[in-house]
Image (cartoon, rainbow, N blue to C red):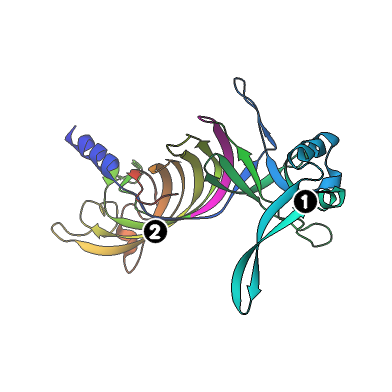
Amino acid sequence: MKKYFIIIILIVSSNYLAGQESFKKVYDIPEVISYKSSPDICLTKLEKVKFEKLSKEEQDSIRKIFPIGSVIEYEIEKNISGKKVKIKETKTVNEEFLKSQIVEKEIQIKEGKELKGYVKFEDNKLYVNPYLKKDENGDYGKRNIYYYQLQNRQTIKLNFREWNVSGLTIPLKYRFKNDDQGISEEFSSDFNANLFIGKTFYGRTSFFHRKKVGNVSNTWKWTGGLILGASTVKLNSTNTSASNNPVESGIEITKGLASIGLGITYSYNKINFGGFVGWDYSLGDESDRWNYNKEPWVGVAIGYSLLKF
């Protein structure tokens, strides 16, 4: 019972993510996000439109603000004798003046395409910078900035994928029993250093807008990948018992280990859980004396990452 209690302590107290870098984090960007109990959120962009291309209703609303014959006063900056000076000027509104105006208009995206992009959450808008691909002419096309506009206490959830490179330690390994070779099961908690190269195959971020008090974002993801590691093992009479030449009682021999394996991790913000399977290869002379050389193991790690996503 005491042994298993120690194992639990090791799992819970481990901080297995020593460092984490994410690459090519790209979100899926739907044109419309639908809700049962609140209005849909549509992907939108600001586009500059000439006055003459606006609808009649839009033109009439501008004419009400700037009626024909009214005078507009504005400031411009001029360079006079090497000095920048602000000068007030006036303009009389007429048809020619109105036709020369360009208006910024919100336009909902209805391209029917599957978009992917990078995002940034500011105030009540989640800005989207689309991931660009070359067309058949080798052109990247327009570089428009899109956005979703959220109401107070409204949430958007977007899926993403990314690549991850992490430094981690697996504090607990379980090595299997082999009755045919006379090898007993073993729990080990030795220090080991590993490089984890993985891809997030399913990730999601929720963006929650809170007016005046600050936005909140939460991210969770599943990542699978390859681990490459290094550690050491002390050979003794117990863990070389199946060898034709076991280590004598009271003697310890330190050997290096190289590890390779596969793993899957789940992360929620800074909380991380990982399950791994791998093989350790003892290095150096007489490395095959170790009972568990090239034998499979499983390992787990739970931790609180000190680094943000």
Q: Which residues are magenta?
A: 152-164
Q: Residues within 10 Å of mark 1 (few under 14, many from 20)?
A: some
Q: 4 or 182, which is in the foreground?
A: 4
Is 140 displayed left or right of 78 in the figure?
right
For residue 102, which numbered disc appears in the image?
Answer: 1
Which residue is the extreme one toward the top? Answer: 37
Figure quadrant of residue 176: top left
Secondary structure of residue under mark 1: strand
Q: 155 or 44, which is in the foreground?
A: 44
Amino acid bearing label 1: Ile
User: What percent of the width, then of the height, locates residue 301?
Assistant: 35, 44
Q: Does residue 84 sit above or below 71 in this rendering?
A: below
Q: Which residue is mark 2?
A: 229
Amino acid bearing label 2: Gly
Q: Residues within 10 Å of mark 2 (few under 14, many from 20)?
A: many
Residue 154 visible in the picture: yes
Magenta stretch secondary structure, dominant: strand
Q: Residue at x 42, y 50 (%)?
A: 278
Secondary structure of residue under mark 2: strand
